[in-house]
Amino acid sequence: MIRKPFFSPRLPRLSYTVLPKDAGLPLQVPPIPGAASPSPWPKEGLDDALARPALDFALRHLEKLPGGLSFSPFASLENAIHTIVMVGMDQDLLSTSVQQAIRESKDGMAHGARILKQITRVEKLILVVPDHLRETAAGCGCEVRTTSLAYPGFLPKLLMHRVFNHTVPAGLEPQDLGFLFVSAESVAALGRAFAQGKRDDDKIITVIAKNGAAQNVRVAVGTPIGHILRFCGIQAKDRDRVILGGPMRGKAVFSTDLPVEPDTDALMVQDAEDIVAPSLSPCINCGACVRLCPAKIQINMLVRFLENGLYQEAADRYDLFSCVECGLCSWACVSRIPIFQHIMLAKHEIARLKAKGHNL
Ligand code: SF4
Ligand code: SF4
């Protein structure tokens, strides 16, 4: 049997996509009539707030900038963040929106990095980019590190291991070790806001058509995804799959009325003909997923617990919380077990039960 990849038969290679040098500027998706704009900043004290960026101002007016930057970790008394890592690379295959954002906003990024330092009082800012963006990144005024384009090397926990030589223990996040990861697009948006004296919520997203063709567009956060698809001339028919995010880590959505979120980097439509349905076939212990897993999880065992709803046992015995959420296992599985979806459901259920006070 010839195996079709689970998520998309149109994936090129397991390598992040490089934005071509001659890629033009992204087209602007016109706002929908009556769409709300970000509230203007109060005039009183604004000059002072712009001259002396402070956390209080950021918490009130700059939360969830395009790219998803949040200042709330710095509001906590337990905050021990010593390093901010600005990720200058996309998080999924086929997406090039973050590369486009930093290529376009080199000055905005340098300005944003200075403001970020002042607001957070964190001295160490490091920009991580792939090799081809080293030159672009050089002008941002902070330390630059590079890493290869092999997927999924730009996910925060893997960057922690490969670039910063720290292993994030299962169940913890980089933030617990004092590293806060933010999208470089957010830093550019911060610089832009301070340069203009107002917030704008435009962000770049990569729109991936059914034939795999991708284009970057600029769009306001909150725009319904159906509006963007119409602008790009893409029709999502009955039984096609609309995905917020890219082919490996994206989430299928049930309605094109849903909005673009601050951290949405890609939007994808998969033709009904190309969708490979999950199966109820059992794991055959082929080991394909185990060989690919960057966290070295024994997935063939993990999946047996997940399929039976034994989530806490999966965490205790087979490293559920070591998963870095790359999606490679689902992509590789010859039995077409939706492993990644099982993993995400299990993590969600454990978090939900803990929040309700269950003693797991
Ligand atoms: S998604 Fe799958 S392959 Fe990726 S880290 Fe998690 S278990 Fe491993
Ligand atoms: S790829 Fe699928 S069938 Fe093979 S070991 Fe992993 S879960 Fe089992």
Image (cartoon, rainbow, N blue to C red):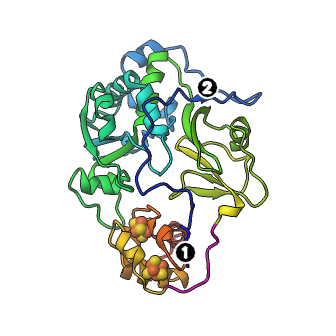
Position of residue 257 measured from the top left corner of the image (x, y, whole percent): 74, 46
Position of residue 341 measured from the top left corner of the image (x, y, whole percent): 55, 69
- In this rendered view, identify the residue nearer to me: 147 or 261: 147
Mark nearer the viewer, 1 or 2: 1
Mark 1, residues whose alpha carbon is within 10 Å: few (<14), some, or many (≥20)? few
Kind of residue at badge 1: Ile
| Residue 2 marker | 1
> Which quadrant of the structure image shows residue 297?
bottom left
Measured along the vertical axis of the image, is residue 170 above or below residue 46? below
Q: Residue furthest front?
A: 2
Residue 360 visible, this angle: no
Residue beneath the point at 48% across and 85% down: 304
SS at mark 2 in the image: loop
Measured along the vertical axis of the image, is residue 320 above or below residue 106? below
Looking at marks 1 and 2 on the same chain, the residue that comes earlier in the sequence is marked by 1
Q: Which residue is mark 2?
A: 39
Q: Magenta residues?
A: 276-283
Position of residue 282 measured from the top left corner of the image (x, y, whole percent): 54, 86
SS majority, magenta: loop
